[in-house]
Image: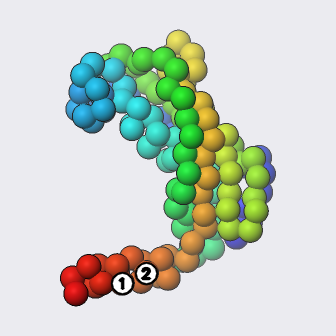
């Protein structure tokens, strides 16, 4: 893993009826849903560091603290940006921001941990086995 501070990633989407608060079940209005904003921020973060990971490594989100500051109506584009602010062993911290055409709609912090894919999936499979017994 060669993740360093300052690495950046972006993700974007057009707000559609499918990613509104109504559709997500997080509210009753036809505006961009907070869960979708969070997912877009996470996508920006993992794409920021993915090129620096070795084969067989991925990252998983472990913490997300954001404020959703402004509503975005259907039809506008939302762009999320993530920047690595710290690397402590396998833990990577990010500053995340989301904007629409009118300005900032959300901001906060996010943490991810770099994992070994096979080991992580094996651990998840053991949970399934334990739940079935």
Q: How is the image coloured?
A: rainbow
Residue drawn at (61%, 35%), measured in percent from left and top?
Answer: 108
The reply to whether residue 10 is in sight is: no
Q: Quadrant of residue 125?
A: bottom left
Along the line of sight, the residue nearer the viewer: 86 or 103: 86
Residue 46 screen position, x and y as percent = 56, 54
Q: Quadrant of residue 130?
A: bottom left
Q: Which numbered tag is attached to residue 123?
A: 2
Determine whether, in the image, residue 88 is placed left or right of residue 117.
right
Along the line of sight, the residue nearer the viewer: 22 or 79: 22
Residue 1 screen position, x and y as percent = 70, 70
62 w.r.t. 95: above or below:
below
Secondary structure found at label 2: helix
Secondary structure found at label 1: helix
Residue 95 screen position, x and y as percent = 67, 40
54 w.r.t. 37: above or below:
below
Residue drawn at (57%, 16%), measured in percent from left and top?
Answer: 103
97 w.r.t. 44: above or below:
above
Report, in whole angstroms, how far the alpha carbon at label 2 lies from the one at label 1: 5 Å
Disc 2 packing (10 Å; few <14; some 14–19; many ≥20): few
The reply to whether residue 84 is in sight is: yes
**Residue highlighted by disc 1:** 126
Residue drawn at (50%, 26%), measured in percent from left and top?
Answer: 68
Residue drawn at (44%, 43%), measured in percent from left and top?
Answer: 39
Is label 2 in contact with label 1 (beta carbons under 8 Å)?
Answer: yes
């Amino acid at each position: 893993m060669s993740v360093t501070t300052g690495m950046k990633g972006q993700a974007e989407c057009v707000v559609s009826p499918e990613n509104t608060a109504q559709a997500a079940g997080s509210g009753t209005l036809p505006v961009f849903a907070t869960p979708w904003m969070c997912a877009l921020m996470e996508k920006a973060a993992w794409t920021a560091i993915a090129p620096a990971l070795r084969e067989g490594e991925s990252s998983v989100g472990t913490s997300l603290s954001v404020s959703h500051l402004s509503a975005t109506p259907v039809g506008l584009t939302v762009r999320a940006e993530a920047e690595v602010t710290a690397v402590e062993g396998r833990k990577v911290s990010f500053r995340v921001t989301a904007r629409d055409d009118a300005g900032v709609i959300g901001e906060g912090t996010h943490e991810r941990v770099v994992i070994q894919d096979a080991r992580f999936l094996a651990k998840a499979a053991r949970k399934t086995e334990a739940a079935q017994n």
